[in-house]
Image (cartoon, grey):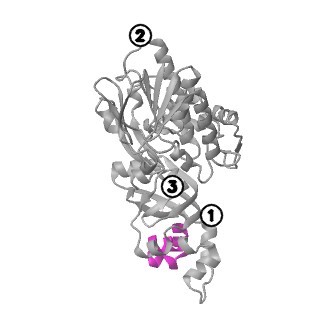
Amino acid sequence: MKIAVIGGGPAGLMAAEVALASGACVDVYDAMPSIGRKFLLAGKGGLNLTHSEPVDKFLLRYGTRWAHIQPLLTGFGPEALREWARGMGVETFIGTSGRVFPSDLKSAPLLRAWLRRLRQGGVGIHVRHRWCGWDEDGALRFTTQQGDRLVSADAVILALGGGSWPRFGSDGSWVQLLAERGVSIHPLRPANCGFDVNWSQHLRVRFAGRPVKPVVVSGITLDGVEFRQQGELVVTATGLEGGVIYAVSAWLRDAILTTGEARIYLDLAPDRELPRLISDLSRSRGSRSMASHLKRCVGIEGVKACLLRECVPKEDFSDPARLGAAMKALPIQLIAPRPLEEAISTAGGVAFEALDARLMIRDLPGVFCAGEMLDWEAPTGGYLLTGCFASGHAAGAGAVAWLQSVRPLSAV
């Protein structure tokens, strides 16, 4: 059995490992000069490998696609992923937030050990191989530094990523190649992304890059469901980004795409209830400036004070009740999500309805899909990587099962 895996990220490498264990001859092809570039980027600030929360809650992180993700996690879920890392010589630990990290927080040692094991097992690794579809005889077409190359395989596993961070290889160029073959693909959209806000020039110049913490973001989804998320965000020259924004970005993006706008509310003083805020703001200001008064009485200064002045009418600053209410629910109008190439991850992709239970494209027998190029999304927190590992595991097993069931082998 000869299996070609196109894409050297976590999904592709896991598919290769599973196929190799079955005795298949496996080759991995990647367009970049080295393997796993986005995986290494994910570990730059500490590799969040997965999450320790209960499986029922874990599944809900995948939104409307949770039912499609469930069988993938049943086959290779968070605990299996931690055990796999342990088998690679990498111990993991659970952080205070429930997130799971390698003991050294790094992705590079894990990737090196993984590639070493794959190579020792006989997997061929081919970099600078950009996939360009199939030729008229069904061979895979690649462009390389040495010219065009044709490769024949009994089965193909596509793990080409989404469309975010194209400089690391996930550029979405596969969309046209599969669409030309009639594969149902939902448009790629930014996920875990920032949003544009029509800031004043003063805020852009003075406070771009400043974190806002602690803060609570709240709002209402298109379905009328209230959301409330605590954490921190960052004011940028174009709008807002950061963990608390990424956590609700799917709702905000869909609201903008559907209605043209989205509004969130920032609680700039989550540690104080409104009555206390009003009481604190009602203290005599004397000769102090309003900036000094806010800092001394309620701890609001810097970027938080600027956000208040950006969004609250001047006359409300003299009314403790209205100013306190604004601090607890500061309205921010979001104009648009940031471009796809800036997003952490991608929504949209190959529709699950176009795949069978083995993740094989129904209209392209012998061609399987895995990872972020599938139509699912999840927030940061280990859910993205877990989904990629799990779908790669399923695609690798699916390709082997299909090949074993086909006699004689069908041409791809």
| Distance Cα–Cα, label 2 vs label 3 | 52 Å
| Distance Cα–Cα, label 3 vs label 1 | 23 Å
Q: Is residue 50 visible?
A: no
The span shown in magenta is 305-327
Q: Residue at x 52, y 76 (%)?
A: 319
Q: Position of residue 35 (x, y in %)?
A: 52, 42
**Mark 3 or mark 2, which is nearer the start of the sequence?**
3
Is residue 172 found left or right of 317 in the rendered image?
left
Write down the quadrant of residue 364 in the picture: top left
Assess disc 3: are there few (<14), some (14-19) or many (≥20) residues with their C-alpha within 10 Å of its C-alpha. many
Q: What residue does disc 2 label? A: 408
Question: Closer to us: mark 3 or mark 1?
Answer: 3
Tag 3 secondary structure: helix
Q: Position of residue 165 (x, y in %)?
A: 44, 50
**Predominant secondary structure, magenta span:** helix
In this view, the residue in front, 317 or 183, is 183
Q: Position of residue 22 (x, y in %)?
A: 57, 20
Q: Residue at x 61, y 88 (%)?
A: 286
What amino acid type should be assigned to the residue bearing mark 3? Ile
Assess disc 1: are there few (<14), some (14-19) or many (≥20) residues with their C-alpha within 10 Å of its C-alpha. few
Question: Closer to us: mark 2 or mark 3?
Answer: 2
**Mark 1 or mark 3, which is nearer the start of the sequence?**
3
What is the number of callouts on the image? 3
Q: Residue at x 53, y 41 (%)?
A: 384
Is residue 116 found left or right of 6 in the rendered image?
right
In this view, the residue in front, 144 or 16, is 144
Q: What residue does disc 1 label? A: 273
